[in-house]
Image (cartoon, rainbow, N blue to C red):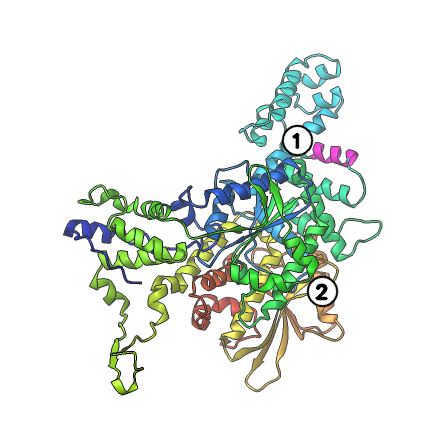
Amino acid sequence: MTVTTCEPTLASGTLENLRQAGNPFRNFFARNPDDEICARYHVPELFALEREQLLGVVNLFRAQPTLHSELIPILGNKGAGKTHLLHSIKHGQQGAGQLLITPGTFQKDTDFLEYLLFQFIDTLLGGGKQMGHRPLESLSEEVGRRTLLRAMEAMSSDEQMAMFPAAGLGGWFRKLGLGGSQNQERLHWLTEQLARPVNPTPLKRLCAQVQLDAEKTCDLVWRFLDRTETHNTAGMMRRHIFHGLVRAALLGDESELANFVTYGFAEIDYQVKPGRQDLVIALFRVLMEMLQSLTIPVVIAFDQLEDLLLARRTDDGHRVAEAFFAGLVHAMHQLDGICFLVFAERGLWNRFVPSLDGYIQDRLNNPVHVPGHGTIKALRLEAPVPELVRRVVQARMAHVLENVIERGDSPVFPFTEEQVQQVARTEPTLRDMLQQFRQLFDHLVFGEAQKAAFDVETPAVTTTHVPSSEMPASVKSMVVVEIPVQPALPRASADAFDLQGMWTQALSEATARLAPDGSLTGATRELQAGLGSLLQICHEHGVKVGPWRLQHVVPEFTFSEHPTYGAMSIAHWVCKDGQPWKVGIGLFLGRGPGKPRDLETKLASLDMTPAVIDHLILLRPDDDVALTGKSKTIWQESERKGTHARLEPLHLDHFTILYAFPRWLATLSESLPPGHALPNLAEVIQENCEKLLEQVCMPVSS
């Protein structure tokens, strides 16, 4: 588009200030639902009604926690503002909060409920924040208070008094029934504090103020849970989960909870051992029941659905979409109380949904009645009106204009009101508008210097006069104007293809998510999916590791009855004209009692008939590589059988790469203009992942 209105004349000082501040439209779209750019440039009035409607749907599950699971599609063209809207729900201050799960990957070859469960666990244990807090921190505080209060109320008077330390002769006085008034006061004060609906003081500090020993208090809670919980599958799971949350609140120790939800839940001494799917459903339902008892709604939001489902352009789009929607409907039938939000391009939704089976369509199109908003079947995001576009521009320019001189009173300077109106009325989506403002800002502020920096040559426009003999009789003259096709990069801008910049941002976000102690264990399946995605892209883009190249990749192969440990990626590495080595690569992250079980499960993949792998590589955190005790025995037994396996110590930075990779890929896909394929990523991958690739390949001689 060409802006034809008059351009303002900028004074040299003003121009220099604007240049120093940089272009506020450089980052013109939200890369994911946690992108801080959303909060920085948020305009509350933008999609305010749609936000209220979605929060209204979420509030249905707050009022009725066991309501049948429902789904709301949010449809809009690419760049309509769907991701920004999701960010405002996840991190905004409206409403009472919820546990919002935003999957960054879709593991299409994994059972859908299993996939959702591990997305839930990753969100719970990870370092990502919602409304300023990690979900686990908020949840452990609430569960810890309630559980400790229940345990204290169930005690006898003597048991309550025994909770508090008795110094010197206090123990003898207590046996004689003397000196208990101080402990009574402590008990009364603590009970009162725990019963308060809102109490900003952490549970750990409350217990410290009445001199309760944190470790002994955790033991007290465990005995209470052991005495009061049922001994069926759900009761045993609740006991471990509640105790793990209490330990997280009182001791800051998240390892027990992390170990249980990734390993322990499959190792309980069941009278009848449940199958893999039964274990997954049982754990999922216990976690859901816990949140429902706290009236915390669970929202699972799939953003950028087209990129989530079609990460590989060679995939059969219809088959992948059918598997996704069928899995979604199955999950809605199996689990109550989940609010599903699907943010998708209209074209993809209209292309795939009408071709699905009738029962799937009926469930996806089921309307939801929301008090105050009527019946909602789907939300459609349209291009904002000019006044809202002006506010978006004003929000972007606000910080830049603080130190700008000679700008008059215009909050949209250096643009004119006419330019803002023209862009708002002629561009189809918010992203297109921001893109135009970015280009216009560069033109007004940087001028020819900007053109030289990008080194973009404007194609010549040619005209040809058509002879009168070749024209229709009714036409007196004709000129054919030929305009060469513009190259893709100028339209999408060089920054949209800043592969290294996107990589750095993805790594930064992944580092924050994997910072807490239990987060690495909780992200086991996400990391495995990231490894599979990395290997697949290496195969498609011709990445080589020394003399080795990939001939075939199975991104994720599931086996055994263990939902967490029974997964690996398979890579067929070939060297020159030799036979390929079928290499299984698995995440060996089990800790404590889970370590030998994880190792045993992974090594069993070498005994399959027919054989699926020739060699097994296990990626182990470099702070715990040594095999001792039972783990050492299992490894030595495998060596005696003549199997080919090796341990690779992996630094946390490499786990971060695995976690970040599929999210970086999704961001890159989202930044591309419609219809454009991914650029070749071989150079970027080899530059950033060379050491990691050597560890998941056959040995590379130096």
Percent from the top left, x then y, of residue 246? 64, 36
Q: Residue furthest right?
A: 271
Q: Is residue 389 magenta?
A: no
User: Label 2 is placed on what type of residue?
Assistant: Phe
- Range drawn in magenta: 219-228
Q: Nearer the viewer, residue 167 or 476?
A: 476
Measured Cα–Cα span from mark 2 to mark 1: 39 Å
User: Label 1 is placed on what type of residue?
Assistant: Arg
Relative to residue 67, is residue 429 depicted above or below?
A: below
Dot 1: element: helix
Residue located at (72% from left, 36% from top):
222
Residue located at (42% from left, 65% from top):
673
Relative to residue 509, is residue 139 depicted above or below?
A: above
Residue located at (52% from left, 72% from top):
538
- In-image side of 378 versus 490 (left or right): right
Q: Earlier in the sequence, mark 2 or mark 1?
A: 1
Q: Nearer the viewer, residue 504 or 278?
A: 278
The numbered disc on residue 648 is none
Prevalent SS, magenta region: helix
- In-image side of 467 versus 534 (left or right): left
Q: Residues within 10 Å of mark 2 (few under 14, many from 20)?
A: some
Q: Is residue 226 magenta?
A: yes
Percent from the top left, x then y, of residue 678? 46, 70
Residue that numbered label 1 is attached to: 146
Dot 2: element: loop
Q: Which quadrant holds the N terminus?
A: bottom left
Percent from the top left, x then y, of residue 109? 65, 65
Q: Nearer the viewer, residue 107 or 516?
A: 107
Residue that numbered label 2 is attached to: 559
Q: Visible in this render: residue 627? A: no
Q: How many marks?
A: 2
Q: Residue furthest front?
A: 474
